[in-house]
């Protein structure tokens, strides 16, 4: 029973971590990577009550750098190390599939 209790606690901690990670991914991101603020310059209030808006004007849409907030990971940038399949190249300068059998990379200058 002690082992079962430990597994339950570990499972609950993992589920909580996943929920927090997903919650943090919502909302807008400014071009410089910062989070937008309310029009009056105050930080958005996130109290968990979805019936109350985070700002008096609704969603925070003001970026310090003057950009417009976008959803996702910083304005549509690809995650680090990723590029479209059509842009991948081989370190041995052949075209994919690579003659050497290696996987194609995004940038031969930094990844070969």
Image (tube, rainbow, N blue to C red):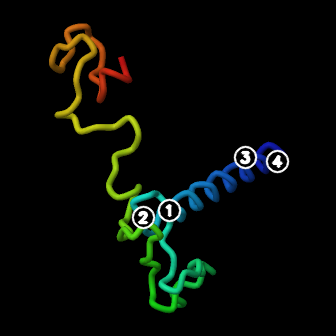
Which residue appears farthest toward the right when viewing the image?
Answer: 2
Give the spatial CA distance, label 3 vs label 2: 40 Å
Label 2: few (<14), some or many (≥20) within 10 Å? Answer: many
Residue for point 68% across, 56% down: 12
Expressed as whole percent of the image width and height from the top left, the position of residue 34 reads: 50, 62
Q: Nearer the viewer, mark 2 or mark 4?
A: 2
Give the spatial CA distance, label 1 vs label 4: 47 Å
Label 1: few (<14), some or many (≥20) within 10 Å? Answer: some
Q: Which mark is residue 7?
A: 3
User: Up-down: is 31 above or below 49?
Assistant: above
User: Up-down: is 82 above or below 104?
Assistant: below
Residue for point 44% across, 76% down: 62
Q: Closer to the N terminus: mark 3 or mark 2?
A: 3
Is the C-beta separation of discs 2 and 4 under 8 Å? no
Q: Quadrant of the C terminus?
A: top left
For label 2, the residue is: 30
Q: Which mark is residue 34?
A: 1
For label 4, the residue is: 1
Is the C-beta separation of discs 2 and 1 under 8 Å? yes
Q: Closer to the N terminus: mark 1 or mark 4?
A: 4
Q: Closer to the N terminus: mark 3 or mark 4?
A: 4
87, 21: nearer the viewer: 87
The quarter of the displayed image where residue 74 is located: bottom left
Residue for point 78% across, 47% down: 6
Expressed as whole percent of the image width and height from the top left, the position of residue 111 reads: 37, 22
Give the spatial CA distance, label 2 vs label 1: 5 Å
Q: Nearer the viewer, mark 1 or mark 4?
A: 1
Q: Nearer the viewer, mark 3 or mark 4?
A: 3
Give the spatial CA distance, label 2 vs label 4: 49 Å
């Amino acid at each position: 029973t002690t082992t079962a209790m430990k597994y339950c606690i570990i499972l609950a901690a993992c589920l909580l971590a996943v929920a927090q990670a997903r919650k943090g991914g919502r909302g807008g991101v400014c071009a410089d990577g910062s989070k937008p603020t309310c029009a009056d310059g105050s930080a958005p209030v996130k109290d968990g009550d979805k019936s109350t808006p985070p700002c008096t004007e609704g969603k925070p849409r003001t970026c310090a750098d003057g950009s417009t907030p976008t959803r996702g990971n910083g304005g549509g940038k690809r995650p680090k190390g990723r590029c479209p399949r059509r842009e991948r190249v081989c370190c041995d300068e052949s075209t994919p599939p690579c003659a050497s059998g290696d996987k194609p990379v995004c940038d031969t200058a930094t990844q070969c």
